Image (tube, rainbow, N blue to C red):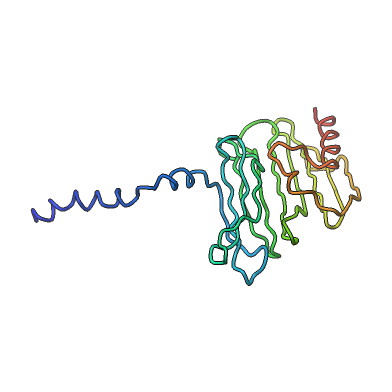
Amino acid sequence: MRLLLAALPLLAATPLAAQDLTLSEADLLPRIIDSLCLDLVDTSTGCEQVVLLSNPDAPDTADLIILTDRRTDPGGRPLLIRRSAFFNGAMWGMSPSLEATDDGALFINSEQIGIGRSPWMQTITLVWDAPGFVMTAFDYATYDRALGGSFDCAVDFRAGTAIAAIMDSESTPLEDFAATIPTTPPAIAEISAFEALPGFCETAIQRYYEITN
């Protein structure tokens, strides 16, 4: 029994030592917000690794990085690097996230629902269209915590359609908007955490502010 009790401190200390991170791990791992491995490019080449990382130089933003499968040759080759692409706040309800779709697309969700009168939620859809990724859809929604009412906007760049709706506190439509837009998807370089909404949505949301304020 004495030998067993004497050994307990050593046993307890072992896992702690085993959990030490290397300097590179300690620098990178705490920055990971979300990660997925999914087939975006070619199902025969393994899954592409998609990572959202907090940006140390712009704390309220997140970087989007997409790499080839680690088992390919060369493994881990960058397919897309977009710095400060999405909002990443310091509080709950302010972190971006990744979501795989059934048809091989990638949803990047971002939001600010933690504080304030006008929480918002945004989803960008990315697909592979050789030789790179393109944004095929943009969805945005916000609502008024104080007075009720909401705004939704959805743009489908492949179909060339855009719709928006303003609703009152009872979810009754007040105004609807629809337009035909060019079917050329925006460049990935246009994705930015603090970029204005697509032109159609920006015009519609200004009308929403006029009605609700």
The quadrant of the picture occupied by the C terminus is top right
Instruction: Name the foreground residue: 163 vs 88.
Output: 88
Q: Residue furthest front?
A: 74
**Picture residue at 59% right of the left edge, 40% below the top:** 93
**Position of residue 33 measured from the top left corner of the image (x, y, whole percent):** 55, 46
Quadrant in the picture for residue 127: bottom right
Left or right of residue 42: residue 1: left
**Position of residue 160 measured from the top left corner of the image (x, y, whole percent):** 87, 54
Image height check: is 171 above or below 5?
above
Q: Residue furthest bottom?
A: 44
Image height check: is 45 above or below 16?
below
Instruction: Name the foreground residue: 75 vs 99.
Output: 75
**Picture residue at 61% right of the left edge, 44% below the top:** 63
**Picture residue at 61% right of the left edge, 49% below the top:** 97
Quadrant in the picture for residue 191: top right
Quadrant in the picture for residue 183: bottom right
Left or right of residue 128: residue 56: left
Image height check: is 212 above or below 124?
above
**Position of residue 88 measured from the top left corner of the image (x, y, whole percent):** 61, 39
The quadrant of the picture occupied by the N terminus is bottom left
**Position of residue 74 measured from the top left corner of the image (x, y, whole percent):** 57, 63
